[in-house]
Amino acid sequence: MTKQYSNPWNHPDKQRFKGKQSGQVLLIIVMLLATVLAVTFSVSFTSQTETQTTKLEEDSKRALAASEAILEASLKQPASGTPYSIAALGLTNLSGFNGSASVSETQGNTFVTPLLQRDEQYTLYLSQYDNAAHTFSSPFSGDLYFYMKSESGCPAVELTYVHTDANNSLTRDLIDPCDQVSGSGELPNLQLVPKTNIKGTDFEYKNQNPKPISGDIKVVFMRVLFNATKLGIQRVAGASSVLPPQGKTTTAQAQTNTSVTSTVSLFQSYPQIPSDFFVTSF
Amino acid sequence: MNKVIYTIFSFFAFFVVVFFGLLKPAYAACCGCNLSTDSYGNCTVSDGSCSSSCGPSIPNCSNLSGPPTITLGQSGTYTADFYSQEANRTQNVEFADHNINPAPLQPPFGGWQNGVASLNTGVIPGNSGNGSVTWTPTAIGTYDVFCRAWNDGQAECRGNANYVDGPPRYTCAGPASSIIVNVINPPTPTLYPTIAITGILKESNGVSCTNNISSNSLSINIVPQYPAGVTPVCTQNPSSGNPKLSYSCTVTFNNQTANPIPAQNLTLNASASEYQSAYWTNNNVCGAAANNTIAVDVAAAVPTTTFNKDIFFNLSGPWIKLRNLSFNGNGNLNNPIPLTVSSFDSDDNTNRYFITHFGSEVGGVTSASTVNVGTAQTSVNNWYMPSYTRQVGFTPSTFFDYVKSRKDYTSVDPASFNLSSVSSGIYYVSGSITNLSGNAGNNVVIIVNGNVTISGDLNTNSGKALAVLATGNITVSNSVSNIFAILAAGGSFDTGTGSGLKIKGNLSVTSLTNQRTQSNNSAPSLFIVNDPGAFVALLPYLSISKYDQTIQ
């Protein structure tokens, strides 16, 4: 005789079946919870990383801004070995920052100009120049090479020496490797094979024989002809003095309270007389 | 039988006599009727009753004469004797191409097919006489020329049998009724000799001269007084580049295809924009008066065909001289230096350079679109670059933009600006300055937003450095003779008129109008002397800085 069940779920087999189903549901719930937790943790971690990155970038920018502010504030300071702190500069809105700026005038054996455009001239200081008092002293003695590297084509440069005598008398040289200028009396020159690298610039030409400087030059106006050109000046070993400073370099460093540091260096040349006012034109 | 034969023979003989008697020529028959013959053998009618049986009375022409050769373009007169039974008759002379073969016998419509002319003699009174025609041939060739006599309504005679086709046209009895005439081209005239004019190009200041000139616009021409058939051609040596050394002209008179006038004047027409005038002189004498005409006669028995004529280029205008500067022009530099140079003042010397120097000084590079300093050098080393285009860096306007952002400066209005009292520094003057003069009290850079008029000598006795930068023009009053300042203008610079002007400092402007003159133009009318001390003194002000930034 078969027992009848009004509710099929009351069937003993069903009861057994029902118990198995409960375990499966629990398993699914556990898996779902694990997934949700994993996603939650992942999102939380990503957000935290991005927050940290953003904070780092922000601090970096603030550090850069702070260092530039220090640099800008210190630009008008005379050259000195004493570093200028943020506090000393009176930049109170940069609280929480540590930083300082120093101004230096570097002497050396070489100097490389920025790229000079056609007809532009660079004022090379061959005497110590007091940027505040506007006086010259300690003229350089020694031999110099003038290197040239044109952006395209062949370079040529006119050198006008201002002497230290009371009349500021002038003498001139011309370096014209490709004979683009008619005339005579140019400085002998040579093409450099291989090229000579000075401070990252591969120079292609130089004067063949070093130019002797007898301690009687204040400045040299180096006027670029024909093509945009970089000029390099190298003191020949054995000279009694190094090249005088050509300007001042201000190095500003700022550090945030999160230890993000930014360093900015700015080279500011000594006064440059534009060729447009020095060369006759009509 | 014999009688019969005799009778037949008699009849035959009678018949022959009668028959051949009837066959005699008409005029013979005419003459047979007892008519007389004239001197030409023709019948003369003396009995009108017999005329009908005498045949035509043939006229005659004879003794045709005239030139056997005619030059084309010229004429020939031909004469013949004519006889005609018809009194007061106009007769003819015919001209026909001999080389058309066979000659047509009958003229169509009154003219020979090969005929070129049929000329009337005019009326010959009576029955005989002399008649003539004048023929002007129009083409070369060989021609039959014959007379033609008329007895109108009866007969005509033609002097050339080739043109006779039968009665009533008969060959003239002549004699000498036809001739052959050759028409020839005129002989090619001997070409007139070519005139050659050569000489050296010389620079002159009116007193002394030197060989060679320097010009980028040299033009040399010879102008004939009567140009028809006359062709002048001139060349320069060298054909390009400078200096120019000499010239050569040829003048041809083409008398073979034209009709030039052989005796005429030839005039020099020469110019060079760098020189005031160009001229010949008598006997090539330097400093002599100009005489730009030579007389030639290529048809003379012994014509003069070569002329040695130097051309003198007068250079006596105002010119500009620099000392110890470099020059970078905005356009062309046309500034020939005269042969004889005198100094402007003690800051100058007599060097014949565009950029002069003293001692160890060296004039700098001269560059411009074209560089013309005549036969002089630009400087002691003659450094120059033609075909060079200046690249402008700073103008007064752009320099002021730089000053505003990087330098300390003081703004003043024109009325309150006092050159002698301002302290050292940069001064921005907001408007034009109309009377700048006097001495600077300190080292000063003036940037003027507008024009500047320099009304008196400027800064000549201060010992201070002055730079005047005008965004507009700078004008110098006529009374000003010395300006000790560095001048720069975004516009033009006008020297004003008057005697020489000296600028000690520098001049950098877009364009220059130099109206200064010297009584003796051997000295420059505008003299610009570099003043490096002024640049050194103004180093803090008339300057920029270069920057190079690195970020770590």
Image (tube, coloured by chain):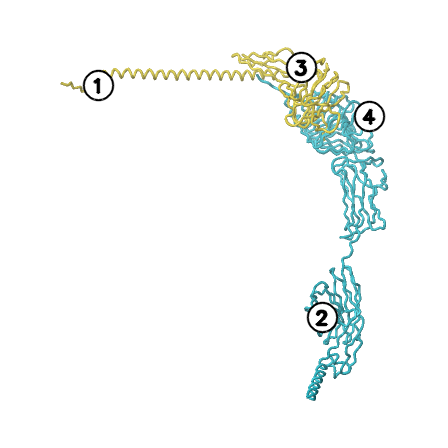
Chain colours: A yellow, B cyan
Q: Element under label 4?
A: loop
Question: Which is in the foreground here, disc 4 or disc 1?
Answer: 1
Checking the image for residue B164, the label placed there is 2
- Whole-number angstrom distance, CA of label 2 to CA of label 1: 160 Å
- Whole-number angstrom distance, CA of label 4 to CA of label 1: 131 Å
Question: Which is in the foreground here, disc 2 or disc 4?
Answer: 2
Query: Which of the two residues, B358 or B295, is positioned nearer the viewer here?
Result: B295
Q: From the top left corner, tell me how far across and down residue B265 is, in percent.
A: 82, 48
Q: From the top left corner, tell me how far across and down residue B38 is, in percent.
A: 79, 77
Considering only vertical position in the picture, is B265 above or below A142? Answer: below
Query: Which of the two residues, B237 or A156, is positioned nearer the viewer here?
Result: B237
Circles 4 and 3 in contact, beta carbons < 8 Å: no
Q: Chain of mark 2?
A: B
Find disc 1 in the rendering and name its residue. A9
Q: Quadrant of residue B209?
A: top right
For badge 2, the amino acid type reads Val
Checking the image for residue B346, the label placed there is 4
Does the rendering let one see residue B416? no
For badge 1, the amino acid type reads Trp
